[in-house]
Image: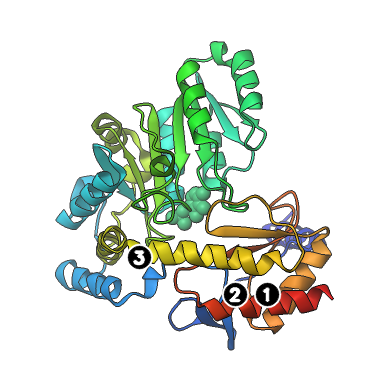
Amino acid sequence: MSLAEYLSKSLNTIKRANWYRQEKTITGLSGAVIELDGQKLVNFASNDYLGLSADERLINSAIEAIQKYGTGSTGSRLLSGHRKLHEDLEKAIASWKHTEKALVFSSGYSANIGTISALVNQKDLILGDEYNHSSLKNGAKLSQSQVIEYSHHNCQDLQAKLIKNRYLYRHCLILTDSVFSMDGDLCPLPELQAIATKYNCWLLIDEAHATGVMGKTGAGCLEHFDIKGENIIQIGTLSKAIGSLGGYVAGSELLIDFLRNRCPTWIYTTALSPADTGAALKSIEIIQSEPKKRWQLWQNIALLKENLNFVNMDFLPSESAILCLKSKTAKETLNLSVKLRENGFFAPAIRPPTVPTSRIRFSVMATHKPEHFTQLNKAIAEFRM
Ligand SMILES: *Cc1c(COP(=O)(O)O)cnc(C)c1O
């Protein structure tokens, strides 16, 4: 088969299954209201939970960094790419997360696949929640460890699988999202930490949707649950609530030193750009000094729940800024998403195979206005009649 034949055959299969997807063009600044393909929409599809990506101060900080250091960082961190700005950002992350050190990556995805595959190999065991993000799953694959998934949120299943398999392997790494990205629920962190300690495992927590959102200072779910531990590795992204681009690992000095010498997705790639680094640094400063942004976000989360409660549809369990309305069929979900779009709301339909059950996924932002929620309530109520 020629390459072209193979590609078009695969694409046709995707199209027949209704899984074909395309990007949509947003014009202008991102925010709670956007212009998408020429239509003005209330945006419930953004990861920019605090509305920081369009904040003047982040924009100016990025411009200053470019003026001072140029557009590219020109090399890998260990060769010619390292700037003091990277060090400042890593110090700010470590201090916020209460760890000895932190290390920034080009993306959260590369932080996950690089860290997991540096930490464990064929001799080791990985146990991961079945709903984990793609980057955790692919990191596990790349590591060539034995990978076993446990059912979502199910510590009994995890424990049973540890009892059966743990003794056969050298090290064991437990992988979990802290806020699950397609559901919005939290991992049972205190129980996971207890199990990790009992069975001598390391615990890697992906705080992508928790950073800036969860916890007293927005540091994430570890702060939310007040959990610390030497066997914990925290990973996250600079691309969601932080409003920039990049990823990070936070942990002990030993862990970071190890990664600097062993992690291929950090060693063999160009350092984070000055603009992204500068914006992220300013953002972390703002998140810590302006808790009001987080309070507004939580107020809006409560408003969304209140306004959707009246429409007589079920939510998936959520304790974060991600809220999903369940529907019975993929078709109903798609219809509702289209209807919402016609009424000026952008909230994506998420369907199998991405998730096991169809849903409309709403991400709340601190910058949504009360009327956005009442208007949404009206649009859904009409659809239900
Ligand atoms: C978005 C996301 C990532 C990837 O982060 P990027 O910085 O966008 O590469 C990793 N894990 C989870 C759970 C995510 O939601």
Amino acid residing under circle 1: Asn
- Of labels 1 and 3, earlier in sequence is 3
Where residue 227 appears, as percent x and y from the top left, is 39, 34
Q: 372 or 16, which is in the foreground?
A: 372
Pointer 1 with pointer 2, Cβ within 8 A = yes
Q: Can you tell which quarter of the image residue 138 is in?
A: top right
Where residue 275 appears, as percent x and y from the top left, is 27, 67
> In the figure, 215 relative to 36: above or below?
above
Amino acid residing under circle 2: Phe
> In the figure, 23 relative to 228: above or below?
below
Left or right, 29 with respect to 140, comes to: left
> Residue 373 shows which numbered tag?
2
Neighbour class for label 2 at 10 Å: few (<14), some, many (≥20)? many
**In this figure, which residue is indicated by the disc labeled 1?**
377
Measure how far apart labels 2 and 3 are at the Cα level.
20 Å
Residue 121, visible in the rendered structure = no
Pointer 2 with pointer 3, Cβ within 8 A = no
Residue at 45%, 43% (x, y): give it: 112
Where residue 348 appears, as percent x and y from the top left, is 65, 67
> Residue 292 shows which numbered tag?
3
> In the figure, 352 relative to 48: above or below?
above
> In the figure, 180 relative to 23: above or below?
above
Left or right, 171 with respect to 77, comes to: right
Residue at 61%, 26% (x, y): give it: 158
Which residue is the extreme one toward the top? 167
Neighbour class for label 1 at 10 Å: few (<14), some, many (≥20)? some
Q: Which colour scheme is used?
A: rainbow
- Of labels 2 and 3, earlier in sequence is 3
Amino acid residing under circle 3: Lys
Left or right, 293 with respect to 206, comes to: left
